[in-house]
Amino acid sequence: MAAVVNVEKFYERLNKIHAHFVKHSESTWNGAYCLSINKGAADDDNRYLKSTVIHHYLFGYELPDTVLLLTKDGQCIVLAAKKKCEFLEPAVGEAPKKGSVTSLKLLIRNKGDENAENIQEMLKEARGESNGEDVKIGMIMKEFKSNEGAKEGSNVSGWETKLKDSSSKTEIVDVTGGISVVMAVKDKEELDLLKKSSVLSNKVLKHGFVPRIEDVIDNSTKVTHEKLASEIEEIIEDPSKIKLNVPKEAVDSCYFPIIQSGGDYDFKVSAQSSEENVKFDVITVSLGARYQMYCSNVVRTFLVDAPKPVTRNYETLLGMYEACLKAMVPGKQLKYVYSAGIKYLRDVGKEHLLSALPKTLGFGVGIDFRDPNLLLNTKNTVTFRPGMVFSLAISFAGLKLSENVRASLNSKSAVKDLSQYGLMIADMVAITDKGADVMTKYGKGVGDISYSINDDDDEEESDDDDKQLAKKIAKEEEAQPTGGRRSGRLAATSSNHETEGSAERERKQIDLLARKNEERLRELARSQKQKGGDGKARKGEELDAYKNTKSLPDNVLPNQVKVDMANQCVILPICGNPVPFHISTIKNVVLPDPDSAAYLRINFYTAGMAVGKDCPENTAKLVQKYAPYATFIREMTFRSLDSHSLTTAFRQISELRKRARMLELQNQEEANLVKQDKLVRTKNERVPRLADLTMRPVFAGRKTQGNLEAHSNGLRFISTRGEIVDVMYSNIKHAIFQPCESEIMVLVHFHLRNPIMVGKKKQHDIQFFTEVVDASQAVDAGRRSMYDPDEMDDEQRERQLRKRLNEAFKEFCRKVESVARKNGYSLEFDIPYRDLGFMGNPHKEMVAIQPTLNCLCNLTETPFFVVDLSNVDHVHFERVTFMSKAFDVVLINKDFTKQPWKIDMVPNGDKDSIQEWLTDMELSYTEGPMNLNWKQIMSTVAGDDRFYMDTEEDEITPKEAGWEFLRMFGKDDDEGEQSEQESVYSENAGQEESSEEESEEEDFDSVDDESDFDGDDDLEEQGMDWDDMEREAAADDRRKKVDGDDTGDVRIKRKQATSGPPKRKQRRR
């Protein structure tokens, strides 16, 4: 099928050019009377000729050897070969009435007279009503001069030869600037194509170049810049290599990718990738994809073993990039971007970097890769308008690296040989009404582009280590998402695990405990100052069901128990008078089984006795208020021969009490709720979404399934039943992503700052998950062979499903972080550290407890166990003895009014690793041999104003500060220092002590082998059984007989005393 022009698009864009030309002909178009766009022969070596660009813009194709003449009065004349005229034929006579272009006329090349007649007609239309005066004809001047050597006899050659003839009375003016200005503002279709092109470049960088360069760095592979650039170009031209479903014929490379390293940097567009091997120092990559003729460009710099000066300069580059991005707003001139960049460098005291700046900081992009009339330099006065698209390219070239810095680096680092370097970042930026919108999203933060392969063990600067290590670990996690990502601090812990003994850890804990005491004292002083004594308890509100007696119901009989459901009152007859009692004053109601008459007993809340936990808070306060001087009614009993009336009253009172109790609980639930912002839904953008998720907690006891979407200021979960839960970014304290490795589910979990209502309950934790395998999967009765192909296929499918789900959730988390960051919110997903996990019992069930960077949590079982480490004041280990096989962990809250978190039955083998981790996280801990009464301890600590001080109230008498009183040993004992008196023991005493310990261990082991019991049992005193008593009595008799002080009476009594138990033992059998 022959190609035809898109008539509607052709006239729309031609009218856009003509309207601007007519309006600004004297300024932007250099006073041209008409426009002549001449396209010479096809030139594959120069794909970005202005005539080629405008042909693709108007026709969608390149039409070589074609002349397009556009006059001010709206006539468009095209001189071309026959086939090209047939291509344009559908547009003839179809000019829209509302457009400024009135007609299209096609002139077919005439070889007979060498186009003499056609050229004469075109010249006549070009001159119009000039009355013999010279006429200015606008052309693309650069191409007009280059067409001098065009093939003789061609359409362009004949036309331009005629115009050069003095008899034609024409003057050629350059209109390239006008064409650039018109085409700079893209329509909706162009913006969509540019966005797709930008996404393609971003994907090639993310999934093509980055994994490849990481592999090269990891394996120390030798590869040339040119070879690596060729591989990237192949990916651009065939996106299926990175699993992108894009037609090969629709994509192309804007230019041969530019990869540079080793100190030789050229940031011009015309630069070339050298044949030198890639050096692992400062690596820059520049690549551009072309999608359906629309170009895009992205540049990143990757730092390997970067020293501090390089990192600082890169951070300055990022700051300047942000300053320039903010300057790209509609209404401002293009030169303002360069000024904003210079101003930023001066404001931050980096004037010495001004000499490292390029002449331009970017250029306009569209079908033309680099429009020379839309450069972001110091002179361009073109104004930013919505719809324009630019490549913002910020770079520093020729930066020096001092000898001192290089001398301090690791001897294996390639940066040691780097005397000078360059830095560059570039992104595609679209101008919108709200400002600049970056279309190439790949991260450019220091953590995104830094790698560390030769860590300096002696380096004192820990900040760079953390960043480099974080990048290295993130890279490992990218390759295999197992959840094993760790922070720099935790990684340092594992490396020092073998060398750091328990004694060193104890010394650190003593210093840490002292420092924590000082910090807590300052925190409490600040909090007391902020409170200022304003925290007064809320008084009880008086009950006022009826304003006056006229408000009572009219149909109340003198001796009737009446229930007013609307006003929550029970009207009771007292001496024939109806007296209302508010339902909150009634403790309970009893209806005994009726005999000859029915009885109804109503009990009230009164002073002098416990009101109970079901008593409304307001009623309890009123009872306490009136207790000193008021008289209370404890109970009232009513008798009636008609059991129906009292039974009805009993049922109504019970129902009313139930409603009041539910309302009270609901008010308590909603008492401290913080009003959430309204969700702002994302429009005109693709919304990140995860489908077919299950939410926990559920709505009203039912399994809640639906979709999770990430919008501008929060996430929205919409269930299949239409239930909606909104989670605002500002309300998320901790976000956790847990991939499925050994679990049956992959999940994202949000720990909130303020609770939200889910159904009728407020929740601090919201979770969304997908099960990899069913939790209750049926198992066949028959055993299957390990070589069963069906079994192996099932396992393979499950592994693939796990990997696919992990990748989907991980990608969603990245998109959520990006959306949140774009809208000014700070949100980062943590991944639990599996290698630091341990088993424990926080909620009556043994589960896997895993730490994250900010929490200690178990997310797979309900109820969730999430402890924010920033709220933990101290950690205490209970039941720590040599005999026990498990211990308990108590995490004490900084808020002493709240009870501590507790994890029971943690295996003894995990104690050292947990204590290592706590020390690394700068959390103090102590340990002891027994369980403590934490309710009483917290009550005592909360009332002690000098708890964290090391002296009594007289400020002289010393005392243990803070949680030091929980220590099993004193400070001196921890350091292993003992006085001579303490170290001098008799030999016999040592033998007795060791024998006692051995016997205790043997007894404990024997009991432990017999049954599974709580570790506290070995600390409790136990009575002897009958056999032990009998053996002890017999031994006592023998001892006394040998000593000669036993008598017959005693012996008889002993026999009598010991004769009973054996018979009792027989009876038990």
Image (cartoon, rainbow, N blue to C red):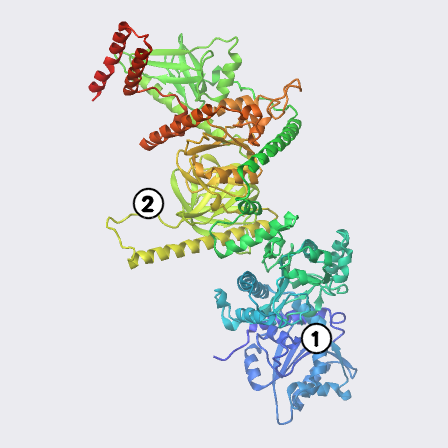
The answer to whether residue 21 is seen in the rendering is no
Residue 24, percent from left and from top: 73, 69
Residue 218 vertical position relative to residue 1069 in the rendered view, above or below: below
Front in this rendered view, residue 680 or 804: 804
Front in this rendered view, residue 353 or 722: 353
Question: Where is residue 874, by image quadrant?
Answer: top right
Q: Which mark is residue 601?
A: none
Disc nearer the start of the sequence (2/1): 1
Residue highlighted by disc 1: 72
Residue highlighted by disc 2: 776
> Does the residue at mark 2 contact the one at mark 1 (Cβ under 8 Å)?
no
How many numbered marks, from 0 up?
A: 2
Residue 207, percent from left and from top: 53, 62
**285 lies left or right of 602:** right
Residue lying at 44% horizontally and 21% vertically, measured from the top left: 613
**218 lies left or right of 350:** left
Front in this rendered view, residue 454 or 188: 454
Residue 375, percent from left and from top: 71, 66
Tell us which disc is closer to us: 2 or 1.
Answer: 2
What kind of element bears circle 1? loop
**209 lies left or right of 1008:** right
Q: Residues within 10 Å of mark 1 (few under 14, many from 20)?
A: many
